[in-house]
Amino acid sequence: MSDTMSNRPAGTGATGTVPRARTQEGAGSATSLVTDKGTTSIDDGVVAKIAGLAAREVSGVHAMGAGAARALGSMRGMVGGDPSVSQGVSVEVGERQAAVDLDLVAEYGTAIPDLAAAVRKNVIGAVERMCGLEVTEVNIRVDDVHLPDQDRDRDSDRDRGSDGHRRDAEQESRVR
């Protein structure tokens, strides 16, 4: 196997080549990148975070994770915890390759096949560029579609009092 990868046919020169990470099996679930100068280990959680952030960058992705994971994540947010960037992401990292599984919620009106292709391309590019691992597959499961009215309904529920009547900001300021 070559230590470089290129999008150009062989014999076109060294321009456009990217150094390829050489790997060896590491201990546990970490991946070891071995060079003449030393070894670098990349944990599965790092690959999952990179994949999660790359997926969220794509327009049309509303949220990540299956229903239960999203509910737990929103509860974590209510108590002041940070949302997990690896929510909805699972990875398998081998010697030289990684496989990624994503659960996501699409925005209504987004073409799901186009969304999946864009997410797949962004995740593969980010993981290969940052980790030096070949991404063999990115499996995408669309768990839900986010409707624009869902945000408005949630906001209007928050504005209603326990008696069901709508409260204005003016009413709230008088009550305090």
Image: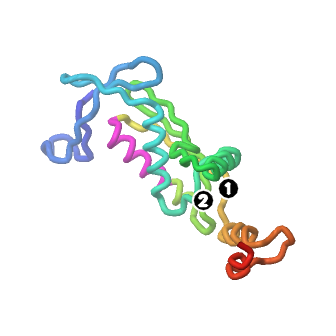
Instruction: Give the farthest residue toward the right.
Output: 163
Instruction: Give the farthest residue toward the bottom.
Output: 170
Counting residues from the start of the chain, the first of labels 2 and 1 encountered is 2
Is residue 93 positioned above or below 173 on the image?
Answer: above
Q: Amino acid at mark 1?
A: Asp
Measured in 3D between alpha carbons, the distance from the residue under mark 2 to the one under mark 1, in whole angstroms, is 6 Å
Q: Which residues are magenta?
A: 117-132
Q: Secondary structure at mark 2?
A: strand
Which is the main secondary structure of the residues drawn in magenta? helix
Is residue 70 positioned above or below 135 on the image?
Answer: below
Q: Amino acid at mark 2?
A: Ala
Q: Residue at x 55, y 41 (%)?
A: 89
Mark 1, Cα crowd under 10 Å, few <14 / some 14-19 / many 20+, is some
Query: In the depicted view, which residue is nearer to us: 144 or 69?
Result: 69
Is residue 84 positioned above or below 56 on the image?
Answer: above
Residue 15 drawn at (x, y percent): 15, 47
Query: In the depicted view, which residue is nearer to us: 82 or 3?
Result: 82
Identify the mark at residue 144; answer none if there is no mark. 1
Q: Secondary structure at mark 1?
A: strand
Circle 2 sits on which residue?
106
Image quarter (top left, top right, bottom left or bottom right) of the C terminus: bottom right
